[in-house]
Image (cartoon, grey):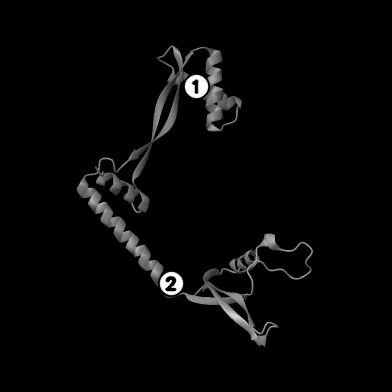
Amino acid sequence: MIDVNQIMFDMIRKSNTVETSNVMEIEEVVDTGLEKTEDNIQKIAIEYLEEKGYSRSVQNMDMAKQHIMESSEFSDTVRVRRRREIVEDTLSEAEPEELDKLMNVCLLDNLMKVSEKLDSLASSRVEYAVEIVDEIVLDKEKGSNSLMEFVSLQTLLNRYAAQGFHVKSFLTRETGNSGKLMMAGFASTKKQTVIVFERVLNS
């Protein structure tokens, strides 16, 4: 059986449109189980200062011990007050009608974001660049003793990416060698790759 409410919970959380959790900070008394002696109070005071990130100055130690003594006033063991965060899921108690309304809010919010994005794209200017590559090669195919300038596909793509371009399309085509005949009597052809780059210019 499909849990529709759970699906709605997950979709609302993923949208980040509404706050679905509430963080509360509470103070609680933690019983360390240690006998209330001077040494144990000293030990817990040091741990308390380290947990808070405070220095072990004489003043801080005295304040920490006083804090622990007050927390342990009515106990035979050492106790210390600590703050703890509790995260409450605000959707867990939501009624189906409330979930429907929240879903509509999330939908409207997403539609507004899409509309803003389309408006931004509509007002943007686009620039294109074209590169024609006779042969696509990879870095590992570079000849170790070659003195010729070597431009691999990776180098080409990274060069344009550094300028804010991204690849718009690839097109492969065959071209002849200006009608010249080879010895066998056939015109030679070679494959070329046309790469179209695109970038959005700031308005």
Mark 1 and mark 2: Cα distance apart in space: 63 Å
Residue 130 percent across, percent down from the top left: 58, 77
Which residue is drawn at the image coordinates 43% and 11% (left, top)? 76
Q: Is residue 173 visible?
A: yes
- Determine whether 52 is above or below 8 in the image: above
Residue assigned mark 1: 66
- Which dot marks residue 121? 2
Answer with left or right where residue 188 lies relative to residue 167. right
- Judging depth in this view, the residue of 203 and 199 nearest the camera is 199
Mark 2 burial class by Cα count in 10 Å: few <14, some 14-19, many 20+: few
Instruction: Determine the image quadrant of residue 131.
Output: bottom right
SS for callout 1: helix
Nearer the observer, 64 or 93: 93
Residue 82 place in picture, x, y as percent: 44, 28
Residue found 62% across the figure and 83% down from its top: 176
- Please state if 193 lies on the left or on the right of 104 as rendered: right
How far from the left and from the top, in percent, is residue 104? 26, 56
